[in-house]
Image: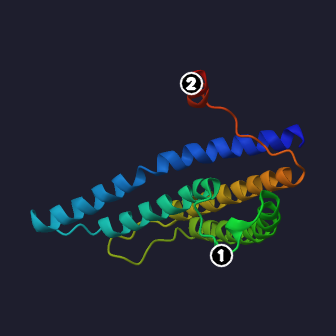
Amino acid sequence: MPTFAIMYVRSVDRFNYLVGRVMMYGIFVLMAVLMWSTISKQAFVIPSYWTLEVAQFILVAYYLLGGAYSIQLGANVRMDLFYHNWSTRQKAWVDCFTVLLLIFYLGVMVYGGIDSLSYSIKYNQHTSSLWRPVIWPVKLIMVTGFFLMLLQAISELVKDIAILKGAPIAPRETSQSLKEKSL
């Protein structure tokens, strides 16, 4: 495989790994917001109008920014009726085809997301709730999440092509894996 392809795969994988590991802790932020909502309603008898939407926004960030990490780990849903019995090359052929469909889908989502984001910024779009926060930050997170998933899908395609060429791209060794080898 060309050096730039290997560098692309390693840099995208590393970046999405870091983003995914950070987003794993987003569930605790979500829990804190929902706990505040419960406490404020029960103890202070003051409803927090912002908590439901903030929780929804956090959930959007949690899922979409963690999506590339999920693709990287292979944690996405796959119909495994025949797949598990196939050889690595057969899996790579099928994955090449399916990841092309994913790349097309994510490309459409990024394109539509950018259009929706620009509209939201141009017209200072707000939600229709009582709190009425602006929507563009959430749309920016959505576009970013789709873009990171698109980059990761391309990385997966390059890895599958490398397998088909007989030269799989090995992940870069981390300091932890080097420590384990030395023991």
Depth check: 58 or 15 in front? Answer: 15
Mark 1 Cα-neighbour bin, 10 Å: few <14, some 14–19, many ≥20? few
Secondary structure category for the residue under label 1: loop
Mark 2 Cα-neighbour bin, 10 Å: few <14, some 14–19, many ≥20? few
Residue at image location 46% in from the left, 65% down from the top:
134
Q: Amino acid at mark 1?
A: Leu
Label 2 to label 1: alpha-carbon separation:
38 Å
Is residue 121 rendered to the left or right of residue 97?
left
Colour scheme of the rendered structure: rainbow
* Mark 2, residue position: 179
Secondary structure category for the residue under label 2: helix
Q: Quadrant of residue 34?
A: bottom left
Q: Position of residue 21 (x, y in %)?
A: 50, 46
Q: Position of residue 45 (x, y in %)?
A: 11, 68
Q: Is residue 60 above or below residue 155?
A: below
Q: Amino acid at mark 2?
A: Lys
Is residue 138 rendered to the left or right of residue 46?
right
In front: label 2 or label 1? 1
Depth check: 172 or 27 in front? Answer: 172
* Mark 1, residue position: 81
Q: Position of residue 123 (x, y in %)?
A: 56, 70
Quadrant of the frame with the C terminus = top right
Q: Quadrant of residue 181?
A: top right
Q: Position of residue 166 (x, y in %)?
A: 88, 48
Quadrant of the frame with the N terminus = top right
